[in-house]
Amino acid sequence: MKPQIKPKKDISYGSGFPHVRLRRLRKNQAIRDLFQETRIFPSDFIYPIFVEDQIREPKKIGTMEEIKRLPLSRIINEIESLLQTGLKSIILFGVSSQKDEYASSAYSQKGIVQKAIKEIRSNFGEKIVIITDVCMCQYTTHGHCGIVKNKIIDNDLSNHVLSKIAESHALAGADIVAPSAMMDGQISFIRDWLDIKGYSDTLILSYSAKFASPLYNPFRDFADSTPKFGDRKTYQMPFTNINEAIREIDSDISEGADMIMIKPAIPYLDLINQVRDFIRLPICAYSVSGEYALIKAASEQGWINETEVMVEFLTSIKRAGADMIITYYAKKIASLLKNELFYKEN
């Protein structure tokens, strides 16, 4: 009888687990697709649209390549092109030539955002979700997000104006208003105001954890909203304080927010993940202009593959726990998804 030869124990995969080969889960594209844990869809994304008065043609701003300010006359074409990619949500920002100390053009029914909402709603009905930015920085001569008195932001007076802006957007037909000024109590003030005025069905997306970040600089150029003095560190959050961010989120939820936002996205994946564990409200993450610009600049230098990095970054935001993502890449990623060109095999 031939003696049986026992194979030598393979210890290269960890003592006691000689048969564990995780590479079996990755051996071809079909298997990788089967076991893919995080998936993104066009409906996950919200596309920012900037509409400007006093222009007749789309206007390019250098720091935001491929993103343009649109005149009102081009809004319908833009929405049609978005719907064709599978995108169903936008967030509107206004760029106004009418600026004063009180942001009065921000809540006028003749304002550019209000006109854009009406135009979109009358042409597309409920086919698209209209979210509007509720702030003052694009409409004030000083460029701050609130009403300024003696170079100090007046919190409560600012809340009153923010409520008027939110009401004007709801009246025009917005589905969701998104207060971004980071004033204390803004959600409670706006919710009460909307309810009193008969807009109890209008949702509030709160910029709950909006950090004071240099990654906003391209946006500020694009929206013409750079502060003329000082900075925004007295109302936007320090990037060092996660516990304070959680308190801000808790506060906004208690005041009646329907969903919360964390902004920027990539530097705060840890916060998105922590918050996902303890709240059941939808979480929106804003992948901001600086994140977009960094990818663009590096790809133009030939240092990275723009599409691959875009897909990885956006997937990481979803993986961290975000339900929705505002991104300047929304059109591009939605087109890739529609054509089954993402997560493709190299």
Image: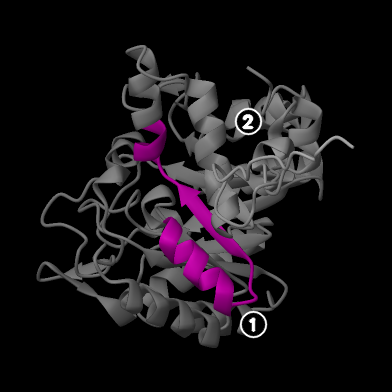
130, above or below 77, in the image: below
Regarding residue 252, the answer to whether it shows in the image is yes
The quarter in which the N terminus is drawn is: top right
Question: Which SS class for mark 2?
Answer: helix
Q: Which residue is mark 2?
A: 333
Colouring mode (rainbow / by chain / secondary structure / one colour): one colour
Mark 1 Cα-neighbour bin, 10 Å: few <14, some 14–19, many ≥20: few
Magenta stretch secondary structure, dominant: helix
Question: Which SS class for mark 1?
Answer: helix
Eye-nearest disc, 2 or 1: 2
160 left or right of 92 in image: left
* Residue 298 in the image, given as x and y percentages of width and height: 34, 21
* Residue 131 in the image, given as x and y percentages of width and height: 61, 54
The quarter in which the C terminus is drawn is: top right
Three-letter amino acid code at the position of disc 2: Ile
Q: Which residue is mark 1?
A: 195
- Sequence-first disc among 2 and 1: 1
Highlighted magenta segment, given as a residue range: 269-293
Residue at x 36%, y 58% (from the top left corner): 136
Residue at x 20%, y 53% (from the top left corner): 142
Of residue 79 and residue 255, the one placed in the foreground of this image is 255
Of all residues shown, which one is farthest toward the front?
1
Mark 2 Cα-neighbour bin, 10 Å: few <14, some 14–19, many ≥20: many
* Residue 313 in the image, given as x and y percentages of width and height: 50, 39
The disc at residue 31 is none
Of residue 101 and residue 210, the one placed in the foreground of this image is 210
As measured in the structure, the alpha-carbon distance from the residue carrying label 2 to the one carrying label 1 is 37 Å
